[in-house]
């Protein structure tokens, strides 16, 4: 049986003429040699990249770039001597001090560096090979200090939180608020997911107010909706935290600031800048153990630590002609509908005769809080029955709501525009074609209707899953076979959009033909 290695006097052990201590310190010496003439706080900017010498970090548009240690050493040398020819021997001495390495290793790490920078055989934007001489960093480089953050008066770390006002009353969301609050306490990172207009922001704001005392007022709310560029996210977050940004903000600098602080960060409306928010949230979760994160989005961030809560629609009564007013008012969707009618100036007491109609309206609106509020505000002009009939053949989703709301929340059409415009072209095409289904459909039926010479069945399957993830379609997995459906509001929007544009490249005729072939799938699949 092999004996255990003797660890005593390990510093005296030698491997190939070197002590263990030599090997332990070699990496540190390499970094010190490579950093010659590089100040500890220097930062280099070139193209979309930022190289931070002290942190040994390369970022592209604020997002960290994975780069091995040796390749990073080479980059530091080349950037520090930008515009100058650096011989291969010089690079080897700088990156591998006191070690004999052949040029093959240098070429290997240079390939990794070029790949990270986006250089290829068609053009060398950053590093140029000078045959027989060495390498030269040819891109313009600016050199400065790492952006700093300073707390200014009114910071969230003072007494005042940065939260919108709490809603006077929320209908049907007590359970969700409690579940999110509990999840934040135990898991630190929760994302509220759901369709546009379902009430994610309202729940997040309520959770923030509920947890103010838990975080001693250090709760900060970031409305990311107005940002039209994902690169603005780190700077906007820093600014909203009450920090003075001395230069272009970075994810690394922001994390360094919150690393030792106990705070609740609420990122609202993440879907259009989701890649940057996902990177930021994951790194905060990993590197700042006292920070708790709550995000709202129409799709999950899909990062480490995230626990997803899909916010359900407000419950509406079943299709029951015998439904009484008292029974209907037991459902949150009906409660909200009646409350919003009263708020719009309509004196209304729901009768047993009207109860099934109101129930049908709420079901038709998919239990979306925004849709219910918008439609309820029109009852004073049209009456219950006429309002219900408008949902079948009028573009009701264009009705306007509160003037002070965000533009995309002033009508359900604007909310759906927001979701639709974020879809890739292929997912839009599949969404158009799925609008032929009046009810539920199977995945096989979706392939039959949506696939053609330009879109194959596998692409349809992926697109359906993505539409579910982005809260534009719903999936029922309770039965032996998963069944899908477009939300009624989404389907009405898509059909109206297709009508305005004259169809989808001739696909309407194709859909009608297939629908005739498989009526059981399109109507009742």
Image (spheres, rainbow, N blue to C red):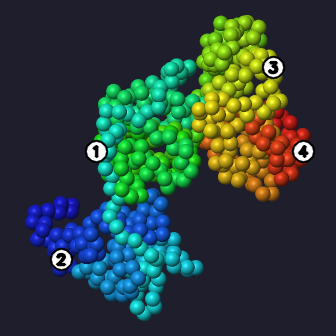
How dense is the environment of label 3, judged by Cα within 10 Å: few (below 14), some, or many (20 and up)? Answer: few
Which residue does the numbered mark 1 point to in the structure image?
260
**Looking at the image, which residue sits at the far bottom?**
132
Label 3, label 4: how many angstroms apart (C-alpha)? 34 Å
Q: Quadrant of the N terminus?
A: bottom left
Task: Name above or below for residue 70 compared with residue 60.
Answer: below
- Circle nearer the viewer, 2 or 4: 4
Name the residue: 66% across, 9% down. 327
Name the residue: 32% across, 64% down. 145
Which residue does the numbered mark 4 point to in the structure image?
513
- Circle nearer the viewer, 1 or 2: 1
* Element under disc 1: loop
Name the residue: 36% across, 87% down. 87
| Among the two numbered marks 3 and 4 on one chain, the one whose residue lies closer to the N terminus | 3
Estimate the x, y position of residue 41 in percent, counting from the top left. Answer: 29, 64
Which residue does the numbered mark 2 point to in the structure image?
18
Name the quadrant containing residue 249: bottom left
Label 3, label 2: how many angstroms apart (C-alpha)? 89 Å
Label 1, label 2: how many angstroms apart (C-alpha)? 40 Å
Q: Which mark is residue 386?
A: 3
Discs 1, 2 touching: Cβ within 8 Å: no
Estimate the x, y position of residue 402 in percent, counting from the top left. Answer: 63, 29
Estimate the x, y position of residue 432 in percent, counting from the top left. Answer: 77, 45
């Amino acid at each position: 049986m092999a004996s255990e290695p003797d660890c005593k006097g390990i510093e005296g052990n030698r491997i190939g003429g070197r002590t263990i201590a030599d090997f332990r310190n070699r990496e540190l010496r390499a970094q010190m040699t490579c950093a010659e003439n590089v100040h500890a706080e220097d930062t280099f900017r070139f193209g979309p990249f930022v190289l931070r010498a002290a942190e040994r970090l390369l970022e592209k548009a604020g997002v960290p770039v994975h780069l091995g240690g040796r390749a990073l050493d080479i980059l530091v040398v080349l950037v520090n001597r930008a515009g100058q020819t650096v011989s291969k021997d010089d690079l080897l001495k700088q990156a591998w001090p006191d070690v004999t390495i052949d040029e093959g290793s240098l070429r290997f790490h240079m390939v990794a560096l070029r790949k990270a920078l986006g250089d290829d055989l068609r053009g060398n934007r950053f590093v140029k090979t000078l045959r027989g001489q060495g390498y030269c960093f040819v891109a313009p480089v600016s050199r400065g200090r790492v952006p700093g953050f300073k707390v200014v008066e009114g910071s969230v770390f003072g007494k005042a939180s940065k939260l919108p006002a709490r809603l006077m009353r929320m209908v049907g969301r007590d359970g969700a608020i409690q579940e999110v609050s509990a999840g934040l306490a135990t898991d630190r990172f929760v994302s509220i997911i759901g369709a546009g207009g379902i009430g994610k922001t309202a729940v997040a704001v309520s959770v923030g107010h509920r947890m103010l005392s838990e975080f001693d007022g250090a709760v900060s709310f970031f409305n990311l909706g107005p940002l039209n560029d994902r690169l603005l996210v780190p700077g906007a977050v820093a600014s909203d935290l009450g920090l003075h940004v001395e230069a272009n903000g970075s994810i690394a600098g922001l994390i360094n600031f919150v690393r030792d602080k106990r705070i609740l960060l609420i990122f609202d409306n993440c879907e259009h800048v989701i890649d940057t928010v996902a990177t930021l949230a994951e790194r905060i979760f990993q590197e700042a153990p006292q920070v708790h994160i709550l995000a709202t989005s129409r799709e999950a961030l899909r990062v480490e630590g995230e626990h997803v809560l899909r916010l359900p629609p407000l419950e509406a009564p079943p299709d029951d002609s015998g439904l009484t007013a008292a029974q209907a008012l037991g459902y949150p969707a009906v409660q909200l509908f009646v409350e919003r009618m009263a708020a719009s100036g309509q004196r209304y007491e729901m009768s047993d005769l009207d109860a099934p109609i109101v129930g049908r309206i709420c079901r038709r609106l998919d239990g979306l809080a925004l849709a219910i509020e918008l439609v309820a505000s029109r009852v004073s002009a049209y009456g219950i029955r006429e309002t219900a009939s408008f949902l079948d053949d009028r573009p009701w989703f264009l009705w306007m709501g509160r003037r002070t709301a965000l533009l995309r929340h002033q009508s359900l059409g604007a909310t759906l525009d927001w979701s639709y415009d974020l879809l890739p072209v292929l997912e839009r095409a599949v969404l158009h074609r799925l609008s032929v289904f009046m009810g539920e459909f199977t995945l096989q039926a979706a392939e039959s209707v949506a696939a053609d010479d330009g879109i194959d069945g596998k692409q349809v399957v992926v697109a359906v899953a993505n539409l579910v993830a982005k809260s534009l379609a719903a999936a029922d997995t309770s039965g032996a076979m998963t069944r899908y459906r477009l939300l009624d509001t989404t389907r009405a929007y898509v059909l109206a959009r297709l009508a305005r544009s004259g169809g989808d490249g001739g696909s309407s005729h194709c859909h009608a033909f297939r629908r005739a072939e498989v009526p059981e799938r399109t109507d009742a699949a």
